Amino acid sequence: MNDQTALITGASSGIGFELARCFARDDYRVVLVARHLDELKEAARLLHQEFEGIDIVLLPFDLSLPDTPDKLYAETTARGLQIDALVNDAGFGETGYFSDTDVDTEMAIIQVNVAAVVHLTKLYLRDMVARNAGRILQVGSIASFTPSPCQAVYAATKAFVLSFTEAVQHELKQQHSAVTMTVLCPPPTDTNFFRTAHAENTRAAQHPASAREVAEEGYDTLMEGGARSLPTMGAKVNFFTSLLLPDSMLATIMNNQLHPAHR
Ligand SMILES: NC(=O)c1ccc[n+]([C@@H]2O[C@H](COP(=O)([O-])OP(=O)(O)OC[C@H]3O[C@@H](n4cnc5c(N)ncnc54)[C@H](OP(=O)(O)O)[C@@H]3O)[C@@H](O)[C@H]2O)c1
């Protein structure tokens, strides 16, 4: 073991699992967080199979509950775990016109994708700043750059993640801190995301990137202390397009990508 610990939320599947795999490969102790214990156990089994002797801690927590970040922090503290790397990956979306979608689902999206990210970052960043060491990876999206009709709330949460991360990155530089924060902005990726968001029948879901490729690029940028990771050519094109076009045109493009009738 390299004696470092990484805590990864959303680690039971998709990009979060692949990020956990990167840390495990580099001999980190990994703390895996998600709601379902069975799926966390399966993720741990796969990691143990590939990386013998790796130290894995499973913490089943629901980040849609407002008190979860405090409980998670208390749990890692009680276990004597110093979190050297925090990955805020857990997140989900919903698809449909905002006037039709369910408000409780959208409040949960905001809680998981925004409130829990801010709260966990607050708790662990303070310790990292005090130690003058540590790294945080925030999982945004290419949706961070564009208003997205049919996923209006989801895209807005990812815009928040980008803005929040970039502001704190600047603060850390002003504080001459060695702590780094990186935002990963994946393109559509082959995970459970589109199924959970009821968006399997959209154009956006048709040619996804591989979760492993996305995670490895994000991990490399995190380890370099980079500010932003745009994995795959698709994400880079999306980002540069967002610089060139007005939001109204970007919204039209995203509506084409995300409206189920436009497959
Ligand atoms: N896939 C894409 O196209 C794409 C593109 C850009 C950004 N992203 C972002 O990438 C991140 C990972 O998503 P993914 O694509 O890998 O999807 P995924 O395969 O659905 O993984 C989501 C992970 O988050 C966990 N999770 C969901 N709700 C949770 C909650 N309330 N509390 C704790 N954990 C929770 C899930 O486990 P449980 O269900 O067991 O809790 C799972 O481990 C998300 O932030 C997503 O917005 C995805």
Image (spheres, rainbow, N blue to C red):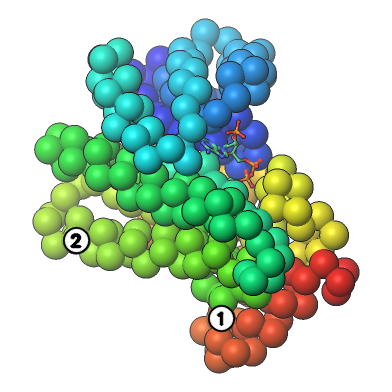
Left or right, residue 106 beside residue 28: right
Q: Is residue 39 above or below residue 53?
A: below
| Residue 136 point in image, percent of width and height | 35, 44
x 82%, y 67%: residue: 260
Residue that sits furthest to the top in the current view? 53
Left or right, residue 119 beside residue 219: left
Towards the viewer: 8 or 151: 151
Binning the other alpha carbons within 10 Å of mark 2 as few (below 14), some (14 to 19) or many (20 upward) gives: few
Name the quadrant of the C terminus: bottom right
Q: Which mark is residue 171?
A: 2
Separation (CA) of disc 2 from disc 1: 25 Å
- The answer to whether residue 216 is visible is no
Q: Which mark is residue 242?
A: 1
- Name the kind of residue labelled 2 in the image: Glu
| Residue 37 point in image, percent of width and height | 58, 19
| Residue 173 point in image, percent of width and height | 19, 59
Q: Secondary structure at mark 2?
A: helix
